[in-house]
Image (spheres, grey):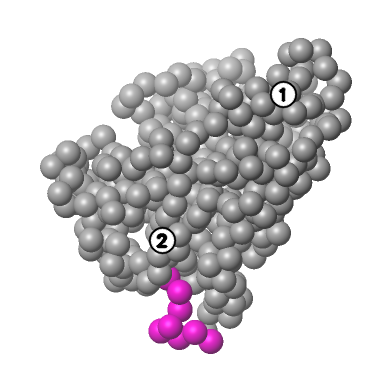
Amino acid sequence: MKSDNKKPEIKTNNQKPALIENENREYAECVMLCPAGYPFEFGLMEDDFEIKNHELFEEYAREQWLGLVVRENSHLFDQKIMPDYGFKIVSAKPNNSIITEKTKIKLITDEINAKKDNTLIKSNYHLKDIIGQENAKNKVKVITKYLEDPESFGPWAPKNILFYGLPGTGKTMLVKALANELEVPLYLIKATSLIGDHVGDGASKIHDLFKKAGENSPSIIFIDEIDAIALHRSFQSLRGDVSEIVNSLLTEMDGISEHESVITIGATNNPTSLDYAVRSRFEEEIEFKLPDDEERLAILENNLKTMPMEYDLDLNRIVKLTKGLSGRDIKEKILKTALHNAIANDSDIITMKNIDYAIKISKIKNSDVKGMFE
């Protein structure tokens, strides 16, 4: 049995640490643990596990750690099912005490859930932060009413929606804002993360994703770059496991496994690259368009509210100069670049000179942005 604590033990015939009578060492009443993982990374090791029965885990842990000294912020290591897997001692009452047959050992499961639910996203976005995209906002109203009262929709509930459009037009931002305002779990993943190393891995990951969303419903699943796993059949020869992944995705989207109050939203820059069977499962396809003049002005004004430096800018001129840019491009490639240029030149104020510099080096013409298979 390994521990980074000293073992005040003597060996018995069954090789279990025996308790030691020690006037200076108290017996532990309760020990709180949280999973810490392995001390090193190795390709064949997986630190994903689930406690099925907490009483059995307590008995299992107590038997192998019997007689060990527990100190807060130190670690205990499993030596049976998951050799060398570490558990951090969050608290020990009393501290620096010995585990006995009467010690209660509790595992903080929130730590496990946080590791397993690494697709669960929280954000500070609000719907008022989204400029334009009125069609998408109208669909959001329907989703909101449904998640607030699922039973009223019956078989007419919104289920599968496709967002498409150029990068940076607000697809991900809108979904984050929706989940935030409804206070529902958002499972936001890149489609490529659902691709496994072995045959069957992708299908299993998709099943687990929908299962977890169903267990925590009402919830939203957002699959970004969905074309990476749901390729059009003419491109499926590029990936040997695409057919298996597509079939698994179809099964979940069809609701063969009931997912009450779970909304699936897919996002792609190029809907024509999607497998037809998958695309047909989306009840509505909503295009995210590049902002017009009025919307670009609103985007500029909204972002300048948090600008950490004074500025003297001609916003109407910037609106004209940024035609063809997305909201993200305006913030990241124009305003941020202008700010950094001003700082680099020891300026105390952002001027149009800095904006012109950003436009010159950062502007992306709409014609330069092409889909993967165009």
Q: Is residue 127 above or below residue 16?
A: below
Mark nearer the viewer, 2 or 1: 1
Q: Disc 2 or 1, which lies upstream in sequence? A: 2
Amino acid type, residue under disc 2 in the picture: Leu
Residue 148 visible in the shown view: yes
Q: Which residues lie in the magenta part?
A: 152-159
The residue that appears at 75% across and 28% down in the rendered structure is 352
Q: Residues within 10 Å of mark 2 (few under 14, many from 20)?
A: many
**Disc 1 residue type (three-letter):** Asn
Front-most of residues 91 and 349:
349
10 Å neighbourhood of mark 1: few (<14), some, or many (≥20)? Answer: many
Residue on which the image places disc 1: 354
Residue 329 on image: x %, y %: 58, 38
What residue is shown at x 70% (from left), y 40% (from top)?
317
Along the viewing direction, whichever of 203 and 310 lies nearer the viewer: 310
Which residue lies at the image location 60% right of the left edge and 39% below the top edge? 322
Disc 2 from disc 1: Cα separation: 38 Å
The image shows residue 11, relative to residue 204, as above or below, that is above
Rendered residue at 42%/55% (across/down): 164
Q: In which quarter of the image is residue 29?
A: top right
Provide the residue designation for mark 2: 162
